[in-house]
Image (cartoon, helix red, strand yellow):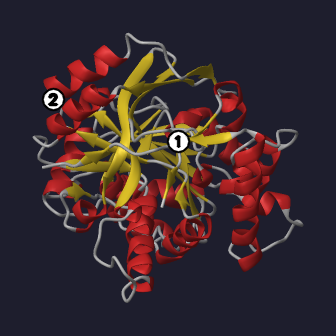
């Protein structure tokens, strides 16, 4: 079963919501966050990326940063203002990006179910990133950014979500990136019906937000350790749940997560082309955007090339057969010497929302030597890998549109 729980959200006043809401903390650099928040004291980036309010060069993981986050959070509570919902509630959250629309349920989900794999994962987390969000949650006693979950469509859930959308929304605005956000609060009885409907959903899947979920688990463990000898130990606590938005699988959009390499491992463009021809059927003048799985586009020395793996290089099994795996095993590792994309500074990743024009710009400007455009992984592939208890290659999926931080906060 999947547990979704109503919670007394801390949220901004309606007129302040557009100014408070911010892009997720992990999709912008410190410099980008500072620029986005400039002139907007209500931006939640002052809470999620508080180093922007400290001197340039401040270590973003220093103790003073987490103290600043807590101080900025308290300031924002009064300035926005942020007010707690009078009773625990569930919410419906709709995002529109161009002609794409997806509508989910904002709720709290069970840390126990995350720990026991009822909530399935597909990504390996990094300890340093977990450390950061765990410290942030504990400094604020709050979870400020939702985990993006998905599930196989359920007709009962759909009906309850659709009924809620016929009511007046709490928030309805278009953010500066042209993503339209609409949020409704679900009534108590309908919310209880929704909780019962989700109890029949066998699994939830993390689409985006593995580090937030892992950090919620660690924050709960630290809270438990701290109250182990205190009265009420073992009782249910708000930290037993984490903030999430759950979307039906049919509405979720996965974009490619493309790759650029800074240099050619001491070789020339001709050397890389020769290596590619040893593992792929190479065509010149290819489309920058692959049209189907099994096609990879490469931008090198001002030209696009199509790479189709030879029969013996297609990989066997759900992970080895992914295009990202084929590219890694047949070109990035042997030709460019990039063995571990998690740690090698010579490779960078570009979300599909930025388009293939960004790949061309990086190569043409000399900031990268070669770029690879990939066909997106499907949600069925992601779920199958998650169900098998396997881990996808790093940076395999880019989900768009992104949820906003600051619209709903779960206090722990």
Residue at the extreme front = 231
CA neighbours of label 2 inside 10 A, class few (<14), some (14 to 19), many (20+): some
- Give 265 or 227, whichever is nearer the viewer: 227
Instruction: From the top left corner, tell me how far across and down residue 114 is, in percent.
Output: 27, 62
Q: Is residue 173 above or below residue 292?
A: above
Q: Which numbered tag is attached to residue 154?
A: 2
Instruction: From the top left corner, tell me how far across and down residue 206 is, in percent.
Output: 32, 51
Closer to the observer: label 1 or label 2?
Answer: 1
Identified at 37% across, 53% down, the residue is 277
- Number of numbered tags placed on the structure image: 2
Mark 1 or 2 closer to N-term? 2
Between the residue at mark 1 and the residue at mark 2, the CA separation in whole angstroms equals 24 Å
- Give 148 or 169, whichever is nearer the viewer: 169
- Give 129 or 119, whichever is nearer the viewer: 119
Instruction: From the top left corner, tell me how far across and down residue 264 is, in percent.
Output: 58, 64
Q: Which numbered tag is attached to residue 408?
A: 1
Q: In this view, does 184 lie to the left or right of 367?
A: left
């Amino acid at each position: 079963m999947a547990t979704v729980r109503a919670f007394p959200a801390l949220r901004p006043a309606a007129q302040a919501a557009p100014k408070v809401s911010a892009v997720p903390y992990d999709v912008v650099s410190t410099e980008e966050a500072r620029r986005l928040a400039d002139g907007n004291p209500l931006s939640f980036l002052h809470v999620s990326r508080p180093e922007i309010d400290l001197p340039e060069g401040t270590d973003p993981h220093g103790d003073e940063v987490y103290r600043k986050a807590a101080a900025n959070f308290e300031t924002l509570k009064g300035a926005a203002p942020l007010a707690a919902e009078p009773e625990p509630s569930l919410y419906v959250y709709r995002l529109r990006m161009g002609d794409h629309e997806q509508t989910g349920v904002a709720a709290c989900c069970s840390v126990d179910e995350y720990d026991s794999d009822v909530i399935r994962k597909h990504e390996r987390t990094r300890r340093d990133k977990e450390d950061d969000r765990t410290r942030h949650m504990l400094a604020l006693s709050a979870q400020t950014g939702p985990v993006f979950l998905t599930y196989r469509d359920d007709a009962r859930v759909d009906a309850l979500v659709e009924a809620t959308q016929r009511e007046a929304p709490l928030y309805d605005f278009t953010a500066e990136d042209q993503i339209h956000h609409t949020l409704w609060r679900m009534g108590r009885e309908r919310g209880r019906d929704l909780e019962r409907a989700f109890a029949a959903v066998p699994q939830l899947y993390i689409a985006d937000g593995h580090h937030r979920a892992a950090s919620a688990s660690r924050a709960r463990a630290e809270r438990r350790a701290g109250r182990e000898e205190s009265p009420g130990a073992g009782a249910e606590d708000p930290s037993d749940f984490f903030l999430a938005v759950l979307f039906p699988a049919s509405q979720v959009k996965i974009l490619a997560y493309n790759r650029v390499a800074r240099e050619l491992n001491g070789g020339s463009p001709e050397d890389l082309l020769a290596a590619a021809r040893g593992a792929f059927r190479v065509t010149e003048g290819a489309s920058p955007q692959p049209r189907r799985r099994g096609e990879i586009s490469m931008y090198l020395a001002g030209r696009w090339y199509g790479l189709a793996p030879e029969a013996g290089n297609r990989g066997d099994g759900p992970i080895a057969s992914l295009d990202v795996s084929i590219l890694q095993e047949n070109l990035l590792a042997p030709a460019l010497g990039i063995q571990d994309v998690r740690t090698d500074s010579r490779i960078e990743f570009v979300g599909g929302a930025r388009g293939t024009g960004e790949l061309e710009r990086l190569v043409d400007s000399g900031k990268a030597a070669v770029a690879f455009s990939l066909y997106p992984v499907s949600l069925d592939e992601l779920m199958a890998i998650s169900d098998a208890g396997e881990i996808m290659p790093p940076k395999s999926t880019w989900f768009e549109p992104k949820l906003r931080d600051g619209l709903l906060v779960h206090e722990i």
